[in-house]
Amino acid sequence: MAMGRNETADWVNPGWQADRREPDTLLAAVVMMTTALWRRRAWIVASAVGTTLLGVAFLAFTDPLYTSKAQVLIEPRPKQVLQTEVVPTGLGSSSVGPDTLLVDSQVEIIRSDAVLGRVVEETNLAADPEFARPSGGGLTSILVGIGRSRAQASVEPGRLQQSPESAALETLRKRLDVKRTGNTYIIDVSVLSERPERAQQLADAIAEAYLADVQDSARESTRQTTEMLSARLDELREDVREAEGKVEAFREEHGLIGAQNLMVNEQQLRDLNDRLTEARTRSSETRVRYERLNRLAEQGVSGVDSITEAIGSDVIADLRRSYGEIVRALSSAETTYGDRHPRVTGLRSERRGIESTIEVELARLARNAEHEYEVARAHEQSLEQRLNQLESVTVGANRALVTMRELEREADAARTVYEAFLNRTKQASEQENLSSNNSRILARAELPYRASYPPAAIVLAAALIFGLMIGSLLAWIRDITARA
């Protein structure tokens, strides 16, 4: 009896029916899959070889890129050149120490158009074919051009074109890697280029451009501050002149002229007080002299013994001595010759003459003393009158002086503000020429000797793994379809 097709197949490959049964356990499924992959291993090897060859072709036809890195240090400690600087150096302070967020801000400044544009201009990247290739070609330009009419294309032919400077700037930004090193104040500036020398040049140029931009920014800020202060300085100078003019005008209007921090009225009042004190002393002395001489004049010869040298009259002193001699001679003559003797009569006549002369001289001295007293008293009264007048004038001047002091305070305040602005303006002007930048290049870029892109080991490993995965998938699908 003839065997059927299935029976013949089962006789040739007894395990065929077992392979077609569903696996009962996970281990059986794994064994079944491993067996299937091993049976189709040619597919896996072919796929792995193919993807590896594609990786090799990618490495062969891709231009290598070299990486060069420079390091910039952001100094957290301030560098104080002047006491008051327009732009503070170093990092700002917070409750936890220096403001480290400022370092992250510097990373973005390095990537800004201000810094990279300076590098493009200084290194002439717009003329470098590596960086000046315009972007947006190929599929992108085709997609962008869909829906545009022929008229629009002719009217706006340059709208989609990119300038060499913009292309170089965009390419440089793509080739640039700026990052902070850990939790430090160091910033790494890495640049990719097809030429090692170009990568080194650009890394150093970006670091230097950043430092120059920071310095220029500080100088520009200082210059603007100086211009602002100078403009305000003219206004303050006019304010000082106006305030001082008001003080002088008020002083002249009210006669508040003075020297050595004293008004004229105050000086005159002080002088009059001193002179009045002297005049009162002089008046008291002359009054005492007059009263004494007046008493002596009233007493006449009877008071001649009480006349002292304090009177200050030489005539009285001589007459007093002559009178004493006559009295002694008369007393002796009366004792010797008696009362009627001519000698006694002559001495008595001389005594009367001296007494009369003394009385006349005392009367004259009393009149002179009275005159001196009257003059001194008149002088005293005149000074008192002038003092009273000056005191009334001073009272009014003191009221005006209150207003003048207020005007002077306003003038002093305006002068103080003006002097502060003047000093600040001079400091800001000098600071424009001083370098207060704390940042510096910590390490310059070195010439790279090995290409950093594309990474050959990674590319080949990824191609091999990808080929094995694709080959395994194809082998599994093939095995399933063959058993169906």
Image (cartoon, rainbow, N blue to C red):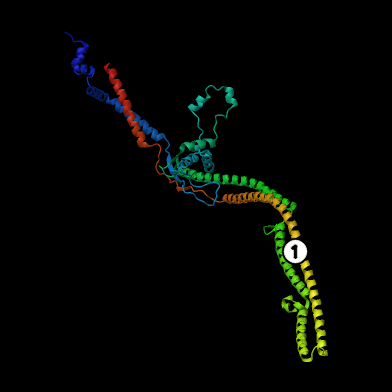
Residue reaching furthest to the left? 1
Which residue, given by chain and number where applicable, does mark 1 sit on?
380
Say above or below: 309 vs 411: below
Residue reaching furthest to the bottom? 336
103 vs 400, left or right, is: left
Residue at 33% x, 31% y is 464
* Foreground residue among 279 and 443: 279
Q: Secondary structure at mark 1?
A: helix
Say above or below: 376 vs 323: above
Which percent across, then down, holds residue 441?
47, 47
Residue reaching furthest to the front? 339
Q: Mark 1 belongs to which amino acid?
A: Glu
Number of numbered callouts drawn: 1
* Foreground residue among 323 and 162: 323
Which percent across, then down, holds residue 317?
75, 80
Residue at 80% x, 88% y is 339
Which percent across, then down, holds residue 164?
54, 36
Residue 334 visible, this angle: yes
Say above or below: 245 vs 107: below
Q: Quadrant of the C terminus?
A: top left
Which percent across, then down, holds residue 210?
50, 44
* Foreground residue among 17 and 443: 443
Residue at 59% x, 27% y is 156
200 vs 17, left or right, is: right
